[in-house]
Amino acid sequence: MLLECKDFGIEFHDHDRPERAVEGVSFSLDAGEILGIVGESGSGKSLTALAIAGLLPRKKLKKEGEILFDGQDVLRMDRKALRELQGDEICMIFQEPMTALNPTMRIGLQVEEALRIHHREMDAAARRERALSCLADVELPDPEQVYESYPHQLSGGMRQRVMIAAAMVGGPQLLIADEPTTALDVTVQAQIIKLLQKINRKEKVAILFISHDLSLIRQISHRVLVMQNGRLVEQGEVEEIFEHPCKDYTKQLLSAIPRVEL
Amino acid sequence: MKKYRNFNFICGAVLTGFCLLIVLTGLIRTPYDTTAMSVADRLSAPSFAHWMGCDNYGRDILSRVMEGMRNTVWIALLTVAIGTLSGVVIGAVCGYFGGLLDDILMRVNDVLFSFPSILLALVIISLLGTGSLNVTLALGIAFIPSFARIVRSEVKKQSALEYVESARLMGAGHLRVIFVHILPNILPVLLSSVMIGFNNAVLAEAGLSYLGVGVQPPQASLGRMLSEAQSYLFTAPWYAIFPGLMIVLMVLGFALLAEGMTEA
């Protein structure tokens, strides 16, 4: 088991009254598996992802339960140990590929960033070679040219591919994808989904795929978690959930999918 | 619009280039020794021998203007360097980490900011004593608050963007995030404030030297020449006109250059 989340909860303490954002969430993720988390806005799915990535702020926040990555508790790790994991074992891609890349840095340098931090033994030529092969793996045409480009010279879809390449460069075990296709148009969405599936098969990386789009989740995931108001409503194999939902909320969600009937 | 921008930029570049040329020539040699006096030439008008005339001791004004400009540029550069470096460090730390440290440093900053920078510099000089080194230090300290404030607000703005989060997620440490990822993104803003800061420093140095607390004689300074020229304003107007003109050209050239660059 790669990731195990036990009775995880978050309570914010930055206002007068404590506010519970996530409560009693337990699930696990095996190596090489694609787990989808689906839920409406504010259901706590992104917060859960940030917690796994170790990106939650340290103050004004109470964390409950445990999140074990390879047996180590990410929630209570010291910052140094956490940084060892980040970028090397756990990586994340974001919703907005427009703002997730540094506008003043060449693509090549950004893809190499994780190598420069975690693999100091690699020299410039080896880093470049690795970055180029990653850019080729995400099916970008002409990696050499992309390597030398700045983010504003690429389209949204290309930028999201670059983000994936930058995430994969260190050979992580877990890739967290927080609504990675929401900002993209539908044809590009489909390409990115295919790409993520291919990477999952080829590199054996586990993917935590977060979305509010049920059809995408159904397409890509092996298993699904349904979240609402910070709680886990239901979890199970993807076909089981979609064909035989047990809980009312899941049924409502599924019936809300617009169907084109001719 | 584009043409207009180019006009600003070109004028600025020409004026700045002209001033730099004078400074550089002055570095290699000046027409006369800057301290050589000659009684015969006292307050003599501009001529082929003395292009800008002579002062009340019979010293060549062109030579002294060259030396004065060199001192001014030197002091202004060091001032801006002190202000920028300290301002960037303080501003970046405050903007990135926030919290109690930010509150404390920014309140101190507010107190410093509430003094006019010349007044603040005068206070520091009265503590340290006069002289060009102390003027540089005093002005540099007086300039820190404005730089710190600009850098802080920019860093705060950039820290909220996703690329910073994604850099942190790559395992980058705080220093790496601040200096490798964020700083290049605030350079355009920083650059224009550095250029405005340079202008302010030139004017402040001239002002302090005019008041007699800046560059000390026998070293030449544009501000000091202006104050000495006051007594001869009607008998030898060139004594005041040329140093004053050079200050105006220097500041105007740099301001136009900055304007042209920020509009680019």
Image (cartoon, rainbow, N blue to C red):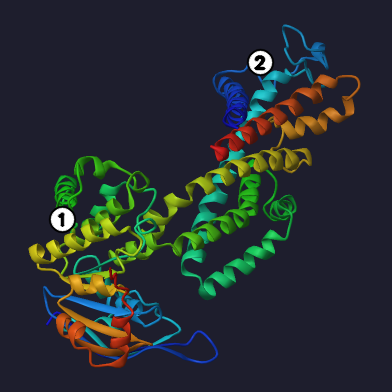
**Where is residue A210, by image quadrant?**
bottom left
Q: Observer-nearest residue: B12 or B55?
A: B12
Count how many numbered circles sit on residues in the image. Answer: 2
At which x and y percent is residue B169?
30, 67
Mark pair 1, 2: CA separation = 60 Å
Image spot of residue B174 (x, y percent): 37, 65
Report whether mark 1 lies on the same chain as mark 2: no
Q: Nearer the viewer, residue B68 or B5?
A: B5
Q: Is A42 on the left or on the right of A129, as rendered?
A: right
At horizontal 68% and vertical 59% (from top left) the residue drawn is B113
Position of B41 relative to A232 (above/below): above
Nearer the observer, disc 1 or disc 2? 1
Give the side of residue A163 with respect to residue B21, left or right: left
Tell me if residue B173 comes above or below residue A26 in the rendering: above
Residue A60 appears anywhere in the view: yes
Q: Residue at x 25, y 48 (%)?
A: A108
10 Å neighbourhood of mark 1: few (<14), some, or many (≥20)? Answer: few
Rendered-image quadrant of the N terminus of chain A? bottom left
Residue that numbered label 2 is attached to = B32
Q: Is residue B29 above or below residue B111?
A: above
Subunit ID for the residue under disc 2: B
Most extreme residue toward the top, as rendered?
B48
Local secondary structure at mark 2: loop
Position of residue A232 relative to residue A208, above or below, is below
Give the residue type that dot 2 points to.
Tyr
Q: Which image quadrant for residue B74? A: top right
Amino acid found under the numbered disc labelled 1: Glu
- Which label belongs to residue A121? 1
The answer to whether A37 appears left or right of A200 in the picture is right
